[in-house]
Amino acid sequence: MTLLQSFRNLSPRARAGVGVGLLAWGGLGLYLSDRAEEQYGLTPTDDDKAALAQALPRITAVDKSDGPRRSGPDEKK
């Protein structure tokens, strides 16, 4: 029996409890990981932040011009 089948065999109330438990575990992990970083001195330095900002892709928004309309392959001229 797979894990998914076992989960589906639970009562709806038990499935909700498992879901809430997983969400609470994830939230607690996010909270505690930040505190553990601070306690163990693993917070990112300014150099680390600059290196990350340099590695991230840059997205440039371009406004659509109001110029002449180009015909596509579907359109008749």
Image: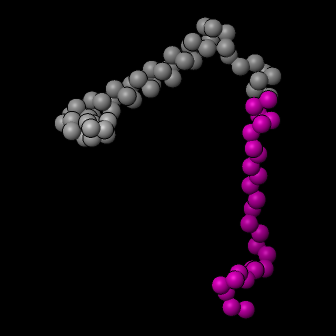
Quarter of the image for residue 44 reads top right
Q: Is residue 65 magenta?
A: yes
Image spot of residue 5 (x, y percent): 27, 41
The residue positioned 75% from the left and 31% from the top of the image is 52
Q: Is residue 48 left or right of residue 3?
A: right
Report the label total: 0
Check the picture and name the quadrant holding the C terminus: bottom right
Please identify the dominant SS of the magenta region: loop
At a point 73% along the width and 83% down the height, the residue shown is 71
User: Residue at position x 74%, y 55% from top?
Assistant: 61
Applied colour scheme: one colour
Location of residue 18 with respect to 71 vertically, above or below: above
Q: Nearer the viewer, residue 3 or 63?
A: 3
Residue positioned most to the top: 39
Q: Which residues are magenta?
A: 51-77
As for residue 43 lying within the magenta part, the answer is: no
Q: Nearer the viewer, residue 32 or 11?
A: 11
Q: Position of residue 33 (x, y in %)?
A: 54, 18
Q: Is residue 25 left or right of residue 11?
A: right
Asked if residue 26 lies left or right of residue 60, the reply is left
Q: Nearer the viewer, residue 31 or 1?
A: 1
Rendered-image quadrant of the N terminus = top left
